[in-house]
Image (cartoon, grey):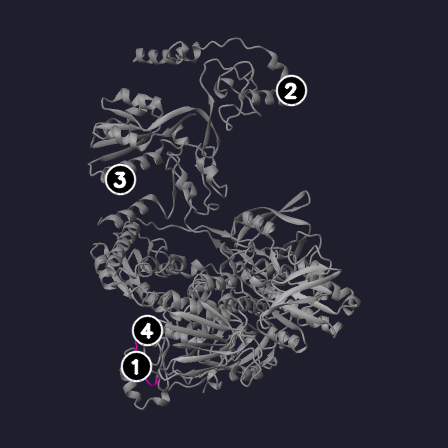
Amino acid sequence: MITAEQKPLQEIFGYIAPYEKILVVGCNECVTVCAAGGRKEVGLLSSALRLHSVKAGKKLEVLEHTLERQCDPEYVDQLKELAGQVDAIVSLACGCGIQTVAAQYAIPVFPGVNTKFMGASESQGIWAERCMGCGDCMLGVTGGICPVARCSKSLMNGPCGGNSSGKCEISEDVDCAWQLIWNRLVELGIQDRYEELVAAKDWRPAGGGGPRKIIREDLAASKIITEDMA
Amino acid sequence: MQKIKQDEKRVLVIGGGVGGIKAALDLSESRKQVLLIDSDYAIGGLMTQLDRTFPTNNCDLCTVSPHLSATTREKFLQISPMTELTSLSGEAGNFTATLNTAPRFIDIDKCTACGECLKKFPEAVRFTPGLDPRAPTCMRYPQATPYAYSIDMEKIDDVEALKAVCKAGAIVPDDSEQQIQVNVASVVLSVGAELFNPGVLDNFGGGKFDNVVPGLEYERIMSASGPFQGNLVRKSDQQRPKKVAWIQCVGSRGINRHDVSYCSSVCCMYALKEAMVTKERFGNDIETTIFFMDMRTFGKDYEPYYNRAKEDFGIRLIRCRPHSIIELPDKSLEITYAKEDLSLMEKEQFDMVVLSTGFRPSQKTIDLAGTLGIDLTEHNFAKSGTMDPVTTSKDGVYVCGVFESPKDIPETLVQASAAASMAGTAVPSGEWVEDLSLYPPQRDVEGEDTKIGVFVVDCDGEIGQSLDIDKILENAKTNPDVAVAEAFNLSCSFESMEKIEGLIKEQKLNRVVIGSGSPRIQEIMFQDMLRRAGLNPYLLELVNLRDQNAWAHNDAPAKSLEKAFQLVQSGISGVRKAKPLAENMLPTSQNALVVGGGVTGMTSALELADQGTLTYLVEKAPVLGGQALNLSQTIEGDDVAAFVKDLVNKVSAHENIKVFIDAVIAEHKGVPGKFTTGVKIGARTEQIDHGVTILATGATPNRPAMYGLGELDKVMTQLDLDAILENDESKIKAMGQLVMIQCAGSREADNPNCSRICCQAAVKNALRLLDVNPDLEIFVLYRDIRTYGFQEDYYKTARDKGVKFIRFDLEHRPVVREEAGKTIVRAHDFILGQDIEIEADCVALSTGLVANTETNKELCGLFNLPKTEDGFFLEDHVKLKPVDMALRGFFVAGTAHSPKVIRESITQAHAVAGRARTMLANKEITLGAAFATVDPVKCAVCLICVRACPYDVPFINTERHSEIDPAKCRGCGICVAECPAKAIQLRAWEDDQILAKLDGLFERV
C-alpha cells in the first residue's frame, strides 16, 4: 500500500489563498486505509479550511468528494461536473492520484498530503516502509526481509559496522535489516545462504534508468483491438 | 367500616421510607406481587426531609431503579398510604394480614393536587409534596405518591363549601375507614425510627433557644422549600450566622438520663455534610465547628470525605463533648467545653448551634413489633439473626433499615434488597410477559409531516428559578412544525407524564423534545412515556436544561436564557431527523456466575440455587471458605468456623451449584443478560453461559511493615492473636500486659480509607482475652474508636472491664522497640501531656483489610468494570445503588466492595442475590437500537474498525466489506468515529441528526 500523511494546514492554506471556491477530493484506496485521505479526512480538512476562512474573514466555499480510486482516468472523469464549478482542487490522494487529476482538469490541483512510501500496517495506526520498488526483488535470498528498503544504506552483503545490539546506528528505533535477515535465516536453518555473495545491484530497474512504465502487451493490445473493431 | 378481602398471595412491605420503597421496587422488578403500606398520607419517609445526602452532596433518589419500567411496576406493586397493620395471623408462607386504611376524604384518582382546598382550608388540608424540591417530588418512584391531598374532616365545619372548592370533584365527605384482609406470604419491616428530641435535655437548650436546632431542622432551613426559601438564617433575627457549631452524639453514646448507649452511626457523616454544604453554598465567611468525641467515618470512601472537610473546606474540629449551652441576650449561644489538653473549661460564642441527634425506635414500631410477635433488643430495635441480619425472631418476617440498627441510606438499601430477596422466595414470580406487548401498537409516522411537541418539564423549580420557561416555549413555537409547547412543573411525576402522553395522542405529535434534567436517568423514563403514547421511543430528543443551564449558569441569567434557546433549537433540529428504530431482543441466560467462594459468594450462590438458578461458583484457592477460615468468633460470639463448615457442606451438596476450585476467570464476552465466560481450571478452560455475575472476591488482610511487624517477635496482627486465642490459651494466661495499635496501615497517606472492622475486632479480642486472663492489662492505642451502632455496647463493656484506651494522632505515633529482651511501646498521652512507655508481652496491630489489588485489576480488565482508587470494585452509585455495578448484570458484595464484618457481608450477599434475580426475571434483554451499520459501497476494507472495536465485533465478510452484528454491537460508536471512509453510522446517532443539531445550535451565530 502507498502511505501518505496530511500536509501541514498552513501549507494548504497558502495554496488555496487566491481562490474562493475549491474542491477537496479524497481517494477510497490506499490513503483511506492509512487514514490520510479518505472520506473522513476530506470532511475534516474541508471543515478546517472553512473555519480558517471564517477566522480570516475571507470568502471560501469548499465542495467535498471522494473517488473510488484517483489514479484511474475513468474514476477521475466523475469529477467533471464538480471541477467545472471550482477555481482549484486539493487532492488527498497519493502523488499518482494528484497527477491523474491534474492531467484531466485545466485548473490548479494542489496536494493535500505528502506521499510517503510503500508500507505495511504493523498495528492500528502504525505503518512502516517495506518496499522501495527496486524492480528486481531479492526477498527470495534474504529470508523475506528486504535490505533495499529496510537497510539504511541498502547494503547487499551483510551489515555495516553501525549495527549495535541489533539496532541501526541512525536510531535506536530502527532495526538493523541485516540482523533481522540473519535471525530469520537462522530460524529457517538456512544460514549458509548468508555466505552467498550478491553481486553489485543493477539500479536501472529501480529508476536509475529513468521513469518506469509497465506495458502489458496483451491487455494494452486487446484495448486497441476492441477500438479497432468499433 | 368497609371490609375487603384479597386472596392473591403477596409480600407485604411495611413502611414507605427509602428502605421500604427499595424492597418494594426490587420485588416488583423480580415480578413478585408486593403491597407497600405506610401510615403517612404520602410515602417517602425520613430521606425526603434531607437537603442533600453524603458523600455525593446531591439528592439522586431518582437513580434507585432506572431499569424498572413504569408498566411493570404498576403490574406488581400496589401502594396503600394511611394504612396500618392491625393483626397478622397464620404462618410463614401463608399469613393473613389485617390492614386498616384511614379515610382520606379525597378520591386519589380524581385529585389533581391543584391546591385550591389547601388555600381555602389551610388548617384541615394535609399535603406535603416533599418538603424539599430535591427530594420526594423528584423521586421517580414514587413522586410524592400518591400525588393527592388529604383532609382532616374533623377540622372542617362547612363540608359543602369544601366540596364547592374542589373543581375535580374529588372530595369524599362520607369516606370511611377500610379494613382489608390480605393473604401475605412474607413481611418486610422497614419502619425506620424517629430522631431523638433534644428538648428533653436540660443542658443544650434544644426547643428552648431559637438558634439551637437539631440536625434535621438545619437541613430544612438550608432547603429551598424550607421556612426561609433556602436562605441560611437564624430563627431569632433572620440574619445569616457567621459562626455555626455542631455538637455530636446528642442523646447517643451516653449513660445519662435520656441518653442511649449505642451509636447512631450516621451523625458524624451528616454533620460533616451539613458543614461542607454550608461552606459550599453560603461562602467561606461562615465558620463551621464540629464538637465530636470520635469521628466515625467508617463507610466506603467516607474517610477521604472527612479529610476533604478538614483540608479543603477548613471545617474546624474540636474533640470534646461540650458541657452546656447558654443563650446570650442577643440570642447568640455560648458553648462551654473542655479540650483534651487543657484542664479548664473554655467558653466560645456561636451564632447558631446544630445538635446532631440520632435514631430512637418510636412507640408505634414497638407496638407494631408486639402485634407481629417479633422480639426486640434491649434498645427496642428488631432483634435480628447475628449471622442472618435481615431475619427476625419470627419466620417469614424480615427487617431492614434503621429498625434493625442505626444505619445510613446505602446500608439501608443493601438490607432492603436483602430482605426483599429473602421475603420474595415465598412468592412465585409472575408470568413472563414481554413488556413491549403491554404498550399500544406504535403509530407509523413515516410520510407524516413533522409535528413536534416541545415540553419543558421542570425539576421542581430547579429550571424555572433561573430560566424564563415561558420565553423558552415562545421561542420554540417560532418553528412552524412545533405544534405544542408547554411547561410542566414536576419532572417525573405521573401527572406530568400522563398529560404529555395525552397531548401526544390528541395532537397526533410525531416528534417530542423534552427540556429537563440529565438523560442518564430521564431518557428511559421519557422513552417509556413515548411507548405508552404509541410512538417509537427514538422519536425523542432530550435537552438538559437543568444541568447545562440552570445549574451551570446561575450567575448569568440572560446568557443562560440565550443558551437555553439554542439548546432547545438544537433539540428541535435533531428530532426532525429522528427515525423510528426497532430494538433487538435476545433471550437471557438464566444462570449465575459467582466469583469468589468465601462466605459472601457461598451465601449468594446458595440463595440463587435455592430459587432454581443454576449457579457457577469459582474459587481461586483450593478450598472454599475465604478469609473467614482465619476467624474463630464474631463480636456477638458466633462460632465462625462451624458456620463456614456448614456453608461449605450445603454449597458442595447443592444440585444447582457447580463449584470450580483452583479456578480463575480467563475470558469473558457477551452482553448483560447473556454472558459467556471462560473459567480456567489448571490447563483446562470451561466455557459457561450466564445472565448475571456476582463479584465476591473478598479482600486481603493487610500486613504493613509498621510498628515492628515481621521484625519483632511479640508484634502480630489481630488475626494472629485470634489464632492464639483459639488454639493456645496458655500463652494468653502467661501474659501480663498487652498493647493493641489501631489503624495500622489504614487512614494513612498510602491507604487513606478506614478499614471499618478493626475497632470492633480490637474490642472483641480484648473482651475474649479478659475472659481467658482477667488480670491481663490491655492498652488500646487508637485514633478514633469507631464502634458504630450496637458495637458501642461492647466498647463500653471493655472500658468497664478496665481496658485502657489511649488516643494518638499521626504526629504522635506509637513507637515499638525491643530493649534488653523486652518489647516496649512508647505512646503520647494527650491528657497527661507527656509520653508514656508500656512494656508489652504482646503487641497486636489492628491491620484491617486491603483490596485484592491484582485479582480485582484482572477482573476489572476482563469484565470492563471500574475500581476505586484503593482497588475495590466501584459500585454504580455509592448512595443509591450500593451493590449494583455500573455495567448491568454485575453486582458486588462483601469485602470486594469495601472492608466489612461477616454479618454485613452476608447482608450484601443476600442483597446481590436479590438484585441478580430482578435481572433474571427478565427472560429477554433489550439491546437498544443504537448499533453500528456499515455502508458496503463506502467501505474500503481497511480493517480499522476491526482493530478499533473493544468487543471484537466487526469482521470483513465474504462480500468484501466490514460487517457488524447488531446483536453483538454495544453501540459505543468507536468504529464510527475511526472509520476513514465514513462508511459506518451509529443508528440513533447518525451524522445527519448530529449535523442538524449543530445547525440548530449555530443558527443564530
- Mark 4: which secondary structure? loop
Residue at the image position 41 percent from the left and 77 percent from the top = B349
Amino acid on which disc 3 is placed? Leu
Residue at the image position 55 percent from the left and 18 percent from the top = A161
Disc 3 crowd, CA 10 A, few/some/many (<14, 14-19, 20+): few
Rendered view: B682 above or below A188: below
Q: Chain of mark 2?
A: A
Amino acid on which disc 4 is placed? Gln
State which tag comes first along the sequence, 1 or 4. Answer: 1
Looking at the rendered image, the disc whose residue lies closer to the viewer, 1 or 3, is 3
Q: Which residue is mark 1?
A: B117
Magenta-highlighted residues: B113-124
Q: Chain of mark 4?
A: B
> Can residue B344 be seen in the rendering of this structure?
yes
Measured Cα–Cα span from mark 1 to mark 3: 60 Å
B116 falls in the magenta region: yes
Q: Chain of mark 3?
A: A
